Image: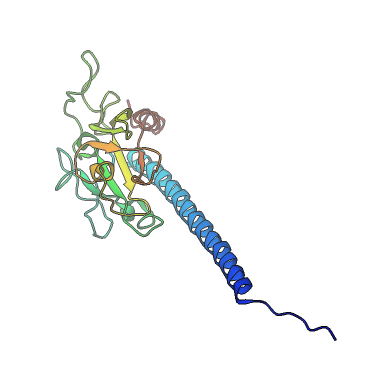
Amino acid sequence: MRRQRGFSLLEVAVVLVIMSLVLGGLLLTMGNYQQYQRSSQTRRELAAARDAVIGFAATRGRLPCPADPGGNGLERAPTASGCTTGQFGELPWATLGLPRGDAWGMPVGYAVSAEFARNASGGTFASCPSGQPTTAPTNAVFALCSAGTLGARDIANQVVGQQLPAVFWSGGPNGLGTGVAETENRDDDVDFVADTPTDTFDDLVEWVPPTVLANRMVQAGRLP
């Protein structure tokens, strides 16, 4: 009777190596897919935030102020010149009726041009070109010719957005990155970086386009 030969230790080892490589590849693919899903979800959330901010302006005649970091998600009180304690902070998710944080559970940053968020109607606007009306309409605190103070550039320093009324961003998978470009989005100045994610930059950035805001305000009867 012919005896059946068993597997040698070498053959078992080869099988185990192959299985580990396959399993590792599956785990890597699954991890990448999960990150892709979270990035896609966060982009949708940022788009929803943009629409909510514009809707707030169409209803209230101004953009919302930021919320305090780590707070209850309610906007800071607007003032005659901007927002209490400044124009940088977190997205006022509670005020806007939005979920708290991005798909990674981190807060969404938010910056607003002070001229668009103040609570005083009337006044003049130095940013309006000569010859255009510079007094704010009765139903809004800013004019059609008002220009935002925020701007966005890509990693190559090319302008991708300028005179922006508001900007909001997610820190992406790494949350609080330490790279130069990512730090630029958290240093509370008017310059932001928006670009395709790379190994060293994974922030997701969205903003309120001036023309879209103006058109919505006209449709809502807030401007001109």
Q: Which residue appears at 19% of the width and 30% of the height?
A: 122
Can residue 54 be seen?
yes
Among the 4 quarters of the image, the one containing residue 115: top left
Colour scheme: rainbow
User: Toward the viewer: 93 or 124?
Assistant: 93
> Which residue is situated farthest in the right direction here?
1
> Which residue is situated farthest in the bottom direction here?
1
* Quadrant that contains the C terminus: top left
Q: Image check: 186 left or right of 197?
A: left
User: Toward the viewer: 138 or 53?
Assistant: 53
User: Toward the viewer: 169 or 85?
Assistant: 169
> Which residue is situated farthest in the top direction here?
131
Say how many tags the image has. Answer: 0
> In this picture, is 132 found above or below 212?
above
Can residue 61 be seen?
no
> In this picture, is 37 found above or below 132?
below
Q: Which residue appears at 38% of the width and 58% of the height?
A: 104
> In this picture, is 90 found above or below 19?
above
User: Toward the viewer: 20 or 8?
Assistant: 8
Among the 4 quarters of the image, the one containing residue 99: bottom left
> In this picture, is 121 found above or below 144?
below
Among the 4 quarters of the image, the one containing residue 17: bottom right
Residue 16, image x, y percentages: 58, 70
* Quadrant that contains the N terminus: bottom right
Residue 188, image x, y percentages: 19, 43
Q: Which residue appears at 32% of the width and 28% of the height?
A: 158
Residue 192, image x, y percentages: 27, 38
